């Protein structure tokens, strides 16, 4: 690769022109699959047609259809979710951030979160400059969301968003060497919904050999819906749209209506006789599987892939603090939350109260949410993977954000600026910023430590500590 202002790389599908910054060559919006339009929205991803000439990859591409989710109570979550829906047919794309002189450099492929209904590579948090600066080629990817990506429909393959991730990994295997990356040293990394997708890919036989390590940040190895639960979402969605519950009828519905219908699916009770709702009513979409990823991994799925996995100490705070519900929760709210995740909610509450005798109702509720959404499933996945004999490195992120009057703490998503070494991003600061009202301060040193661990893991498979130790990222006391 030449160090020019507008470097050109030739991929298997055609040439692309990027831009050169001091620390990275950046290529945005490169298609890895054909546009998912019309009936193709409910089909497996197809190869993209080759193009003639040089495709402009200097600007971000379109995003998957989705609602805008900047408001999150007292927090501005735009740096996490991005701008919402930026229309365009070619929205199955990758962005590449490569060291200017990359030569068979390690590759990190990142899958964004957003509850399976939102998010994109345009989110400011996912700038890959720090990874390129430190010798890693970062690839971020978009995937189908919501109805198109995860609604279970007769006549359509299940988990189309997951199939998109696998297709992006195939693009990496075909093309990343042209950007200076090593196709034999690829780490798949996801956060939140992206982490649950990563767990699903880890357990998916079609992905074997496409990546060599995995990072699961605040995901859920028990986060898939059963077919029975998914059928309930499909029925309600079809009724709300006034169409039959088949891929053929859904193919006639425009994307705008799929986005508009999402509020009517909010809060569905997906509990069945045999399963709780792993997303606790926060999203009507997830993977749809007969068996959970952690169960498949326990039987040997992904046994040859070293894993880095962990959660944040106060995951559940994100869903209560910005809305005022950490302070406003009542004992009745706490019991209702416990009933969503436990067969015997009173016994569960007794265990939590014994463990947290000084906790307020809101703090108990946050702990219940964090465990049900992330910590229990991540723990099960880690245990299953470790039992297979593969290296399993665990971490806990405990740095407490002073946002929302000091209440946010080590909430869900707070670790991302540290992993990407982006704690100095202005949008993360101020009265509504995820990291609080002041400058980076001592958090910069923690970002260096945590980002460095991810770089080492991508390079060698060793983040800097050996199992069974759990590394705790808390920063200065």
Image: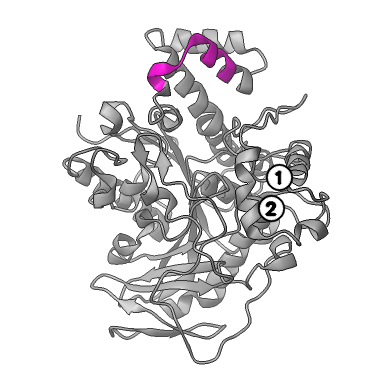
In the picture, measured across the screen, residue 432 lies left or right of residue 280, that is: left
Towards the viewer: 277 or 460: 277
Secondary structure, magenta segment, majority class = helix
- Above or below, comparing residue 151 to residue 206 in the picture: above
The residue that disc 2 covers is 159
The N terminus appears in which quarter of the rendering?
A: bottom left
Query: Is 194 rendered above or below residue 12?
Result: above
Q: According to the image, label 1 marks what residue?
A: 288
Residue under the point 43% across and 77% down: 57
Q: Quadrant of residue 400?
A: top left
- Above or below 165: residue 222: above
Residue 309, x across and y down, in percent: 47, 42
Which mark, residue 381?
none
Residue 292 position, x and y percent, is 68, 39
Query: Residue at point 64% right, 39% down?
Result: 264
* Residue 454 or residue 258, whichever sits in front: 258
Mark sitting earlier along the chain (2/1): 2
Bounds of the magenta span? 326-337
Q: Nearer the viewer, residue 98 or 106?
A: 98
Query: Is residue 129 found left or right of 180 in the rendered image?
Result: left
Asked if one can make out residue 302 in the rendered structure from this viewpoint, the answer is no
Q: Circle 2 — which element?
A: loop
């Amino acid at each position: 690769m030449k160090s020019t202002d507008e470097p050109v790389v030739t991929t298997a599908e055609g040439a692309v022109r990027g831009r050169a910054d001091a620390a990275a060559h950046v290529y945005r919006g490169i298609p890895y699959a054909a546009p998912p339009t019309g009936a193709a929205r409910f089909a497996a991803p197809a190869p993209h047609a080759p193009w003639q000439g040089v495709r402009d990859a200097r600007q971000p591409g379109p995003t998957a259809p989705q609602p805008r989710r900047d408001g999150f109570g007292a927090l501005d979550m735009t740096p996490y979710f991005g701008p919402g829906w930026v229309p365009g047919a070619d929205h199955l794309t990758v962005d590449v951030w490569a060291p200017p002189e990359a030569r068979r450099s390690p590759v990190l492929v990142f899958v964004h979160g957003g509850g399976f209904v939102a998010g994109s590579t345009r989110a400011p948090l996912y700038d890959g400059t720090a990874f390129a600066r430190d010798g890693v080629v970062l690839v971020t990817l978009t995937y189908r969301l919501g109805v198109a990506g995860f609604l279970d429909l007769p006549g359509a393959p299940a988990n189309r968003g997951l199939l998109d991730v696998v297709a992006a990994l195939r693009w990496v295997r075909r093309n990343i060497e042209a950007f200076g990356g090593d196709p034999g040293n690829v780490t798949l990394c996801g956060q939140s919904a992206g982490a649950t997708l990563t767990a699903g890919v880890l357990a998916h036989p079609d992905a074997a050999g496409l990546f060599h390590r995995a990072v699961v940040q605040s995901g859920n190895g028990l986060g898939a819906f059963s077919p029975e639960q998914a059928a309930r979402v499909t029925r309600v969605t079809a009724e709300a749209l006034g169409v039959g519950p088949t891929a053929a009828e859904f193919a006639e519905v425009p994307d705008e209506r799929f986005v508009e219908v999402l509020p009517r699916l909010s809060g569905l009770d997906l509990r069945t006789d045999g399963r709780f709702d792993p997303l606790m009513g926060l999203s009507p979409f997830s993977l749809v599987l007969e068996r959970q990823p952690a169960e498949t991994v326990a039987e040997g799925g992904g046994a040859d892939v070293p894993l880095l996995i962990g959660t944040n100490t106060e995951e559940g705070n994100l869903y209560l603090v910005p809305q005022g519900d950490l302070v406003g929760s009542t004992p009745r709210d706490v019991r209702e939350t416990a009933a969503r995740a436990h067969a015997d909610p009173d016994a569960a509450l007794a265990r939590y109260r014994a463990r947290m005798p000084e906790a307020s109702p809101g703090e108990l509720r946050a702990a219940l949410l964090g465990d049900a959404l992330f910590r229990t499933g991540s723990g099960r996945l880690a245990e299953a993977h470790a039992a297979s004999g593969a290296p399993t490195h665990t971490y806990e992120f405990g740095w407490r954000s002073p946002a929302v009057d000091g209440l946010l703490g080590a909430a869900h998503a707070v670790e991302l600026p540290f992993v990407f070494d982006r704690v100095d991003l202005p949008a993360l600061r101020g009265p509504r910023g995820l990291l609080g009202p002041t400058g980076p301060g001592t958090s910069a040193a923690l970002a260096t430590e945590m980002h460095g661990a991810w770089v080492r893991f991508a390079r060698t498979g060793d983040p800097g500590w050996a199992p069974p130790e759990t590394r705790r990222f808390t920063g200065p006391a």
